[in-house]
């Protein structure tokens, strides 16, 4: 019994058109485009090859699901998947050079939230193109920005092949590639970071998660490799992202132009699942528009739980909108809600003078904020002092930000003149180092060379350990003044720690209103592998104090385990 009948695709198109299945305008436009092509196929010079579409649908049901409760069962396509596959393989046009009909679509852009079956669909298309597309020497690639991401689709395809008896006997499967000996066809994973995309003769590429790519170099290379193929396919399944300057968003706009009839590009099929502009993202009814596999591979209760977190946390809200509703959100949303920060306010006046602390300094431009934070790990307490030139305070007052009042209330130091006088900062650091057990203090090297040198001469060294890659500790004397580059790899762990201890209420802070103001300004940058950090360029205003706090917490995380609870020869603890 067939499980993937062409009628499923037809029914899906009818249900979208009638409104029986809720859909955003872009899905409705894709369906209208299909109906228009059916009505005007002769005028457009194309034909609908139902047999060709059904052939691919039938092949996919020879494959098996590889995980969950459906593992081992035939790959049953959902309506939207059948519609996509039928369109991609069913529309053809005549080529007079060899009197053959070839596929109209060479490229497919499918934008859809996570957990809706896009990776499995990509894997199934890749296997068909490897095994059954009647193309000798087919080169099939699963491609992504990183090796790990590229292998996700490849591994899914490999598991499908191994669990599908009919296909398995035709495919030779090795760790890093699959091949069909009788047609000399191959499949492997390639990535942007491996730099291994040149010289390909691509028949099919599954170009996964385009939204994380900073350039379209890999995509262009794969497309160039298709030049000699009569009917290659570049399938691009992706979720939405947050970088509207990235090539994915620009290509998305091209696809929207195609759907809305403002482009003459005819070889690209686009299917974009999201919610409409006037939809309320808080309403469950709208979630179905963006998630066509809701209730199948993605459960409503999962979305409800993600939504609850989104209502409590600005970063989770951005993630929910981009990854669950496929909205391109550029992170101009409050990261940590005011109520959580206010709940952590607990100015401590009784910290012992010898308490262990770690410092973090974020130096602004010469006429800008400088922030200096101290973090006391034994009390999970952070305090921050701000320094601003007097003339900057005068300028800010014109825009309704009363730096002078903050200074009068003791929350800020106004330094004389047009530029920040770091002598005030140095004297405060020297005083704190004499009062407390200041193990290390870190600062971004930007603008800090002279200040760092002066602090090193005064503060000296700490005997401490750095953990080697094998887990052992390497003891030595280290300058108390450390550089702390604000790269994602450095900033992400303490940023996540800061978020966690604010959210769960275990952090205590000095109640400085400048910090509360800055926290509201923070926009986060999130990279391809999930690292996060405050992004000054995207933030709506100053965030120096939050950065300084994170640097202080990060400095503690790096050094604290190596300065406490150890014995090495004659040394115990910290010197």
Image (tube, helix red, strand yellow):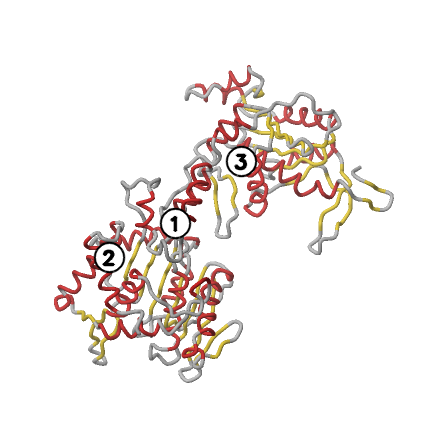
Q: Please name the residue that numbered disc 2 is placed on.
A: 30
* Extreme residue in the right direction: 570
Query: Would residue 325 be found to the left or right of residue 523 on screen?
Result: left
Q: Residues within 10 Å of mark 1 (few under 14, many from 20)?
A: some
Q: Please name the residue that numbered disc 3 is placed on.
A: 503
Q: Quadrant of residue 387?
A: top right
Q: Residues within 10 Å of mark 3 (few under 14, many from 20)?
A: some
In what element is the residue under mark 3?
helix
Q: Earlier in the sequence, mark 1 or mark 3?
A: 1
Q: Quadrant of residue 118?
A: bottom left
Residue 211 point in image, percent of width and height: 40, 53
Q: Is residue 55 visible?
A: yes
Q: Please name the residue that numbered disc 1 is placed on.
A: 300
Residue in view at x 68 percent, y 27 percent: 429
Q: Earlier in the sequence, mark 2 or mark 3?
A: 2
Q: Is residue 367 visible?
A: no
In what element is the residue under mark 1?
helix
Query: Would residue 381 be found to the left or right of residue 126 on screen?
Result: right
Q: How far is disc 2 from disc 3 in space, using C-alphas? A: 43 Å
Relative to the observer, which residue lies in front, 403 or 163?
A: 163
Does the CB distance between marks 1 and 3 fall below 8 Å?
Answer: no
Q: How far is disc 2 from disc 1 in space, using C-alphas? A: 26 Å
Residue in view at x 67 percent, y 24 percent: 428
In the depicted structure, whether residue 340 falls above or below residue 120: above
């Amino acid at each position: 019994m067939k499980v993937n009948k062409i009628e499923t695709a037809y029914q899906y198109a009818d249900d979208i058109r009638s409104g029986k299945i809720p859909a955003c305008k872009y899905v409705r436009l894709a369906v209208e485009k299909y109906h228009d092509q059916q009505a005007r196929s002769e005028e457009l010079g194309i034909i609908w090859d139902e047999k060709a579409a059904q052939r691919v649908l039938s092949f996919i049901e020879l494959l098996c699901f590889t995980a969950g409760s459906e593992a081992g069962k035939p790959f049953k396509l959902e309506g939207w998947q059948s519609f996509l596959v039928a369109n991609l393989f069913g529309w053809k046009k005549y080529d007079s050079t060899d009197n053959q009909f070839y596929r109209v679509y060479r490229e497919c852009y499918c934008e859809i939230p996570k957990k809706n079956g896009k990776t499995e669909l990509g894997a199934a298309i890749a296997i068909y193109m490897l095994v059954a597309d009647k193309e000798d020497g087919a080169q099939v690639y699963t491609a992504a920005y990183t090796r790990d991401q590229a292998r996700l689709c490849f591994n899914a395809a490999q598991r499908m092949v191994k669990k599908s008896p009919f296909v398995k006997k035709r495919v030779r499967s090795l760790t890093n590639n699959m091949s069909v000996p009788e047609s000399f066809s191959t499949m492997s994973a390639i990535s942007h970071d491996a730099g291994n995309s040149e010289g390909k003769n691509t028949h099919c590429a599954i170009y996964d998660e385009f939204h994380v790519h900073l350039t379209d170099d890999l995509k262009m290379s794969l497309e160039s490799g298709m030049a000699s193929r009569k009917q290659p396919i570049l399938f691009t399944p992706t979720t939405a992202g947050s970088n509207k300057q990235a090539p994915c968003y620009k290509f998305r706009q091209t696809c929207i132009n195609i759907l809305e009839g403002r482009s003459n590009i005819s070889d690209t099929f686009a299917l974009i699942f999201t919610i409409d502009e006037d939809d309320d993202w808080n309403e469950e009814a709208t979630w179905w528009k963006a998630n066509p596999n809701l209730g199948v591979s993605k459960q409503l209760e999962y979305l409800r739980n993600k939504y609850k977190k989104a209502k409590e946390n600005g970063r989770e809200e951005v993630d929910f909108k981009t990854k669950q509703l496929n909205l391109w959100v550029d992170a101009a949303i409050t990261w940590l809600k005011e109520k959580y920060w206010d709940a952590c306010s607990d100015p401590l006046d009784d910290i012992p003078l010898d308490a262990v602390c770690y410092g973090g300094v974020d130096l602004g431009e010469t006429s800008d904020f400088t922030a200096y934070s101290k973090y006391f790990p034994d009390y999970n307490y952070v305090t921050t002092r701000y320094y601003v030139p007097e003339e900057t305070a005068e300028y800010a007052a014109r825009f309704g930000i009363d730096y002078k009042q903050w200074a009068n209330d003791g929350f800020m130091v106004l330094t004389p003149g047009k530029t920040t006088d770091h002598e005030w900062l140095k004297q405060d650091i020297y005083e704190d180092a004499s009062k407390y057990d200041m193990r290390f203090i870190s600062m971004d090297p930007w603008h800090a060379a002279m200040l760092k040198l002066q602090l090193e001469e005064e503060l000296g060294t700490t005997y401490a350990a750095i953990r080697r890659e094998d887990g052992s500790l390497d003891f030595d004397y280290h300058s108390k003044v450390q550089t702390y580059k604000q790269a994602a790899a450095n900033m992400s762990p303490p940023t996540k720690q800061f978020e966690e201890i604010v959210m769960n209420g275990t952090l205590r802070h000095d109640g400085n209103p400048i910090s509360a103001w800055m926290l509201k300004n923070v926009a986060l940058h999130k990279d391809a592998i999930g690292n996060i950090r405050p992004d000054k360029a995207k933030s709506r205003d100053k965030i120096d104090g939050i950065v300084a706090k994170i640097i202080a917490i990060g400095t503690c995380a790096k050094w604290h385990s190596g300065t406490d609870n150890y014995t090495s020869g004659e040394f115990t603890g910290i010197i």
